[in-house]
Image (cartoon, rainbow, N blue to C red):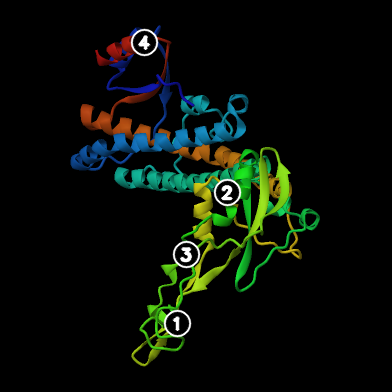
Amino acid sequence: RPPPTCTRIHTPTRDARARRTVELENLAEAKQLVVPKLLVGTLDSLMSLSDELGKYDSAIEVVVRKIERQYSDVVGGKEALADPLKVGPVPPKRFLEEFQWDIAKYPNRRPLPELVQLILGGVGSVEEDLKNLSINLSEKTQQLSALNRKKGGNLAMAPLEEVLTPDVIQGSGVQFLDTDYLRTVVVVINKAAEPEWLNVYQGIGTDIAGYGGPDWASGGGCGQNDGNFGAEIDRQRETGSPVVPGSATRVVAEGEHVLYTVVILKGQYEAGHIEGDEFKQGNFVDFFDNFKASAREKRFIVREFEYDPSAKTVSTQEQADDLDAQVQQQKGSMVRWCKTHFGEAFSAWVHVKVIRAFVESVLRYGLPPNFVLAVLKLTPNKEKQVMQALDR
């Protein structure tokens, strides 16, 4: 990575260069950049390109810094310092000092705007690859973190497949029902709230299940057309809890939580009706979500769980180990990618800087091109004096 005070100078004549060399002797170390002849083009094209090169320079620097940051994040700061990224076989500093224009990759006889777009196209591909790799690595890392949180969580978070094993279920005597009318649900309760749970669970969600039917008592009797039948029946005229009384079963206790099961009504059908000559099927109203919400209001946690004794359960630890192996594999791929493509992005950045210096020099000093490009390594705290010397 080049020093932050690194810059480039361009001097129009040998005499001027000699004077500035004397002034800069104690302020900076200069290395001349060898640049092939570039196509100048028209003055208008140079002025237009000059306006854009500053933005291109900054955009490519962003990509270079992203690669550096991603590499450091993956391998760690100390490892990144011990094994820094290189441009090919050499460090960035040496690449700058020994810079050679890559004629094979960036033909110097192509028009400058076309040459710049060629460089930007390559950097754009590098940035897109980095984005995709970073997203994939981030997703796997987040999945691993979430799995580790579950692994170390309490009954409110732990995977129920590992808690409610066949041995635990058999030992507690609980039966998991899943019929047309009934289902068994799992509820996690704080130990301190267990007495309250036993007192109130049969009344959770008293507005959920509709028990209203035809009013035969005050009407004309069974079978009489009183307008209160089919879709006209108000099922919610009388409501109650969907919980089956006496169905709560204590299954397991762990830490500060207790796990219970309770049986609830699965749901109810709304009556169908006839529209014209067509019968419209009634809708089925599932009670689970409403029961879950009502239980949450009382600080009881209803967890979704479907018991399948024949299912083979993969433990959270096994899942975490498998995911960790995937993360490590992707980290290795990311490190190799950064080492391979950092040099490409850094080289493109330096080539754009050289083009920028060339264009600004032609615009300042005119044609034919007669100047020297150099890179400066500034003495610490001497930037202001260097800039003053260059401006004279």
Dividing the image into 4 quarters, which one contains the C terminus?
A: top left
Mark 4 and mark 3 lie on one chain; the one further toward the N terminus is 4
In this view of the protein, which residue sits in the foreground, 302 or 113?
302
Instruction: Find residue 60 and report its horizontal and vertical position in percent.
Output: 40, 37
What amino acid is labelled 4 in the image? Answer: Leu
Marks 4 and 3 sit apart, C-alpha to C-alpha, by 91 Å
Q: Which mark is residue 301?
A: 2
Is 274 placed above or below 137 here?
Answer: below
Mark 1 and mark 4 lie on one chain; the one further toward the N terminus is 4
Between disc 3 and disc 1, the foreground one is: 3
Q: Mark 3 points at which residue?
A: 239
Disc 4: CA contacts within 10 A as few (<14), some (14-19) or many (>=20): many
What amino acid is labelled 3 in the image? Answer: Thr
Marks 2 and 3 sit apart, C-alpha to C-alpha, by 23 Å
Q: Name the residue under label 1.
A: 281
What amino acid is labelled 1 in the image? Answer: Gln
Please tell me whether mark 3 sits on a helix, a strand or a loop: strand
Is label 1 in contact with label 4 (beta carbons under 8 Å)? no
- Report the side of 367 relative to 126 (left or right): left
Instruction: Find residue 26 and report its horizontal and vertical position in percent.
Output: 40, 6
In this view of the protein, which residue sits in the foreground, 297 or 277?
297
